[in-house]
């Protein structure tokens, strides 16, 4: 049985046992995955990125495999860094509520649950915090970018490359996001005119040189950005790195990373969202911008997507952050971090109730959209080609097209959703209070 087949069997078994949706069951199965118990063929040889181990999030999986390939380890048990540990060091969790409005187009909602909402900056922040020797290059020249990449690969050094997710193919993003949705992949080696790429799918993905070049050039803000990491000669104190990362995460709840967006990030963003869900007087309120029909269906499906899939592990990444805090407690010997982990587990359950409510809100177009997102994720786990994945991604968009949700029912759903979101905010506030107290005790 292949690794992918075994993974699918485990996920399906858990779904039948617990009643969880695919995203949640998958996260639990992969969250308990132990890279130290894999067979020898799955372990990278020194200096080689040949493990392609599976993980929960595609970008952090690829980055974690990169760390494994250069020998970065957790001194507590002398094991490879887990995806949860890397994710926590990169910042872990956060919150952003924003609605983009373009002329002659419906509003585009994003509810994002990660510390940094730009996937490339999230991964590079994690690498920098680990004290790695990091060579970051960027150029508008495709020829120069390929030459720099080939030089690194010829030295046996895998390269973390920033690509545009929408241009990569097989993405569930709206077409308006093309050129504005960065993610990271790890290019591991060149095979003739093609490249082997770790997309975080649990196996190598073969891309032609033009395909890779197009994806690298399409992200408008950082064309051909690439990072090559080297393990530092002096080993960093991982406990200090963890403490500082936790402090930064706590700060992000109250302080926005960009001027002019203070009301969109952290707890301010959460409170703004829950108010706008039912405010009929605010021109940005859901009763006004998502009043009924297709707009209402898309808003609900996009919310589910933001909580379960888009740049986040399921439950807004709160469960994975709890796993990070448990590892942090063991690494630092600071038991209060484990108490904070329990509080984040409660927050994860609360956010799962939000996404479950949306998926089961008795609106066929919304239910189908959520099911299509789950089916799309399963297809990626089976390592289907990008063309096949793109067809599945297109079905996600098509599922809510022409939705007929009446305004009265939409407002009723929004009111109930606001109650679930309010409960999730309360759980999140308790988690942060517990984490702040734990950090203050260090």
Image (cartoon, grey):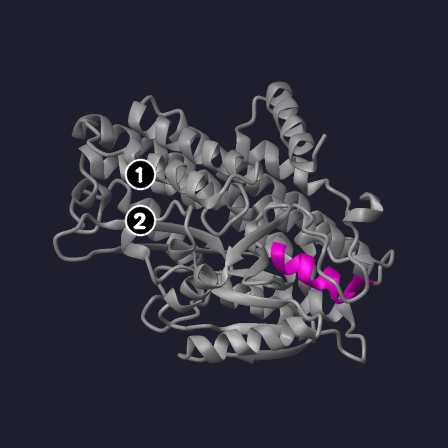
Residue 289 appears left or right of 274: left
Q: Which residues are drawn in magenta?
A: 62-74
Q: Which mark is residue 397?
A: 1
The verdict on residue 73 being magenta is yes
Q: CA distance from mark 1 to mark 2?
A: 8 Å
Mark 2 neighbour density, 10 Å: few (under 14) some (14–19) many (20 or more)? few
Q: Is 393 located above or below residue 174 in the figure?
A: above
> Does any portion of residue 422 appear in the rendered image?
no
Q: Which residue is mark 2?
A: 174
* Quarter placement of the N terminus: top right
Tell me where residue 35 appears, x and y as whole percent.
77, 48
The answer to which of marks 1 and 2 sits earlier in the sequence is 2
Query: Do tag 1 and tag 2 residues touch (Cβ < 8 Å)?
Result: yes
The quarter holding residue 91 reads bottom right
Residue under the image location 28 percent in, 42 percent down: 277
Image position of 108 (left or right of 96)? left
Could you tell me which secondary element the residue under label 2 belongs to? loop
Residue toward you, 329 or 398: 398
């Amino acid at each position: 049985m292949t690794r992918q087949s075994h993974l699918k069997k485990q996920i399906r078994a858990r779904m039948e046992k617990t009643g969880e949706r695919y995203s949640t069951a998958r996260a639990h199965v992969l969250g308990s995955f132990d890279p130290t118990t894999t067979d020898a063929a799955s372990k990278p040889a020194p200096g080689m990125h040949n493990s392609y181990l599976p993980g929960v999030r595609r970008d952090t999986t690829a980055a974690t495999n990169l760390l494994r390939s250069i020998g970065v380890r957790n001194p507590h048990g002398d094991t490879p860094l887990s995806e949860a540990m890397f994710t926590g060091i990169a910042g872990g969790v956060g919150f952003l509520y924003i609605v983009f409005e373009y002329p002659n187009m419906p509003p585009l909602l994003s509810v994002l649950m990660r510390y940094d909402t730009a996937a490339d900056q999230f991964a590079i922040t994690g690498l920098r915090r680990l004290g790695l020797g990091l060579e970051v290059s960027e150029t508008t020249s495709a020829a120069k970018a390929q030459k720099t990449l080939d030089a690194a690969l010829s030295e046996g050094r895998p390269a973390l490359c920033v690509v545009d997710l929408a241009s990569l193919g097989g993405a569930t993003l709206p077409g308006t996001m093309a050129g504005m949705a960065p993610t990271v992949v790890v290019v591991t080696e060149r095979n003739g005119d093609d490249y082997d790429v770790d997309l975080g799918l649990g196996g190598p993905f073969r891309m032609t040189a033009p395909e890779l070049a197009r994806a690298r050039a399409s992200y408008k803000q950082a064309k051909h950005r690439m990072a090559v990491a080297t393990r530092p000669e002096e080993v960093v104190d991982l406990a200090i790195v963890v403490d500082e990362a936790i402090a930064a995460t706590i700060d992000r709840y109250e302080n926005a990373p960009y001027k002019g967006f203070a009301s969109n990030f952290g707890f301010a963003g959460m409170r703004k969202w829950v108010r706008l869900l039912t405010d009929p007087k605010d021109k940005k309120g859901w009763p006004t911008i998502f009043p009924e029909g297709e707009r209402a269906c898309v808003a609900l499906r996009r919310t589910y997507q933001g909580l379960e899939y888009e740049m986040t592990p399921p439950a807004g990444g709160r469960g994975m952050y709890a796993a990070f805090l448990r590892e942090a407690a063991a690494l630092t010997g600071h038991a209060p971090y484990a108490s904070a982990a329990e509080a984040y587990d409660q927050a994860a359950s609360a956010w799962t109730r939000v996404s479950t409510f949306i998926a089961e809100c008795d609106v066929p177009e919304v239910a189908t959209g959520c099911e299509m997102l789950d089916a799309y994720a399963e297809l990626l786990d089976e390592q289907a080609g990008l063309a096949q994945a793109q067809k599945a991604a297109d079905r996600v968009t098509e599922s809510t097209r022409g939705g007929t949700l009446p305004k009265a029912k939409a407002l009723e759903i929004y009111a109930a959703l606001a109650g679930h979101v309010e409960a999730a905010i309360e759980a999140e506030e308790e988690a942060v209070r517990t984490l702040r107290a734990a950090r203050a005790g260090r």
